[in-house]
Amino acid sequence: MEVRTVCGSITEVEADAIVVNLCEGVTQPGGATGAADRALLGLIGQLIASGEIKGKLHEVTVIHSAGRVPAMRVVVAGLGKSDQFDLERVRQVMGAVARRLQGKGVRTLATIVHGAGIGGLDPAAAAQQCVQGAFLGAFRTETHTTGEAPPELERLLVVEQDAGKLAEMEPAVARGEVIGEETDLARYLTNEPSNLLTPRVLAEKAEAACRELGLACQVLGPDEIRELGMNAMLAVARGSDEPCQLIVMRYQAEGARGTLGVVGKGITFDTGGINIKPSEGMERMRGDMAGGADVLAIMRIVARLQPALNVIGVIGATENMPSGHASKPGDVVRSLSGKTIEIDNMDAEGRLVLADCLEYARREGAQRLVDLATLAGATVTALGHVAAGMTANNPEWAEQVKAAAARAGEKVWQMPLYPEYRELLKSMVADISNHSGRPAGAVTGAAFLSEFAGDTPWAHLDIAGTSWSEQDKPYAAKGPTGAGIGTVMELIGSLAG
């Protein structure tokens, strides 16, 4: 989808549909909505008076203009209560509009910036979220269906009447376009069936995606991984006929303000290994590489936006399968860090892969670390599908990550990392166990990872509950979400100044 910023009045823009908005409780539309109402001879006001338009969040009303404005359709988007409006809702509002219009013959959509001036929201930040919301709502999951696909949105015009604001608005709109496009790449990869997206295919796609943007990409296979001593990752890969892949992407900036390591869990299919999962819902385990998909998208965004920060992206890609070669509960392996690990549960495989990947990123010069992973089902039990669990070994770094999430309009909730949780991972035969049973399951996985982050400031984002929407929503189809990308990009922006 092509995105442009346009200076002018929304009622005069040539488009298939124009979008204005209304807060809940407002009875007399003003601003751009008032201008559209006057052009439509008071029709919006009549629909408000009749109760058909209430301004509720996610409400989308499509009015055919009958030639009174250049656009065939005028869309009134409900913003909900003004005192509850924030950046997340900006994104949702535009997602709801795009989803409603997708496949309806609307190829060019023009919109005002929703939320500009409401509740102190920064207009540029709101413009960025408007654009990201359009990508959110327009994304299609039916990538392997046969037959003719319905027409898609091809062009989004962000309309600003005040020419003096364009200098601030244009970069924000461009940033939203880049993040929206690459987030959709992550969503596409997360949704791909595991027979079509094996570790090798993921590595090939990463190489091609990096080559397109001139981004350095290195892929290490099983022999190189073994030579390095990444035996925790190899322990997971043993059960599969598909060779594991370590995908390493590097962005080098002029005048860089340090180096951030971004690490992603890339389990392209997770059966649970010898500790096999129940069959119900196992098809969803194709999405256990959502963290890895996020990292690839983040590296492409970085290459396109070029912040003043070195970034190294590391994806540990493998399948977790049961076989005669698979690792068994009670096995002991030596990780890249030198620490020995007792494998108590092969369905706690993600932390084994991440342990080696975190150490690898540290050795490559990462001064700060953040990992994204669908790590623990217990995090879904604790937080549902609303917020990602966040754990950190450094209070200042934790506050930076939480602030970045707030700016991105994403919800994270910090989990504790008390020493007692580490005690639960004691092993009789090794330095640490990879599993401690049900108690504190949302925390002990992160406690395990903290051992391999060492003294490097590190934050873990458990996106097990947020990387996938379990149901259709007004602003997004059921399926992958790309959760976490916005938070990390805001984090990168703050580190880069």
Image (tube, rainbow, N blue to C red):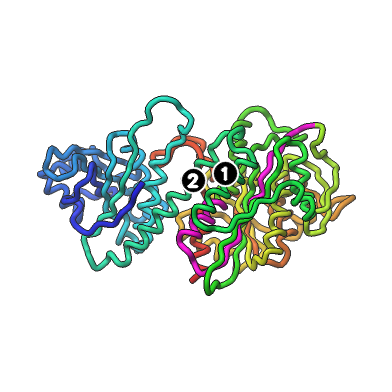
> Image point 60% across, 36% down: which residue?
286
Residue type, numbered disc 2: Leu
52 or 133, nearer to the observer: 133
23 or 39, nearer to the observer: 39
Q: Is residue 40 highlighted in magenta? A: no
> Image point 85% across, 51% down: which residue?
427
Helix, strand or loop at disc 1? loop
In the rendered structure, the answer to whether residue 283 lies left or right of residue 297 reads right
Residue picked out by circle 1: 465
Asked if residue 240 can be seen in this view, the reply is yes
Residue type, numbered disc 1: Gly
Residue 310 percent coordinates (x, y): 57, 66
The earlier-in-sequence mark between 2 and 1 is 2
* Mark 2 and mark 1 residues within 8 Å of each other at the beta carbon: no
Outermost residue on the top side: it is: 147
Residue picked out by circle 2: 185
Between the residue at mark 2 and the residue at mark 1, the CA separation in whole angstroms equals 19 Å
Asked if residue 440 can be seen in this view, the reply is no
Residue 97 percent coordinates (x, y): 32, 42
284 or 473, nearer to the observer: 284
Q: Is residue 416 above or below residue 135?
A: below
Q: Is residue 311 highlighted in magenta? A: yes
22 or 230, nearer to the observer: 230
Q: Residues within 10 Å of mark 1 (few under 14, many from 20)?
A: many
Magenta span covers which residues?
295-323
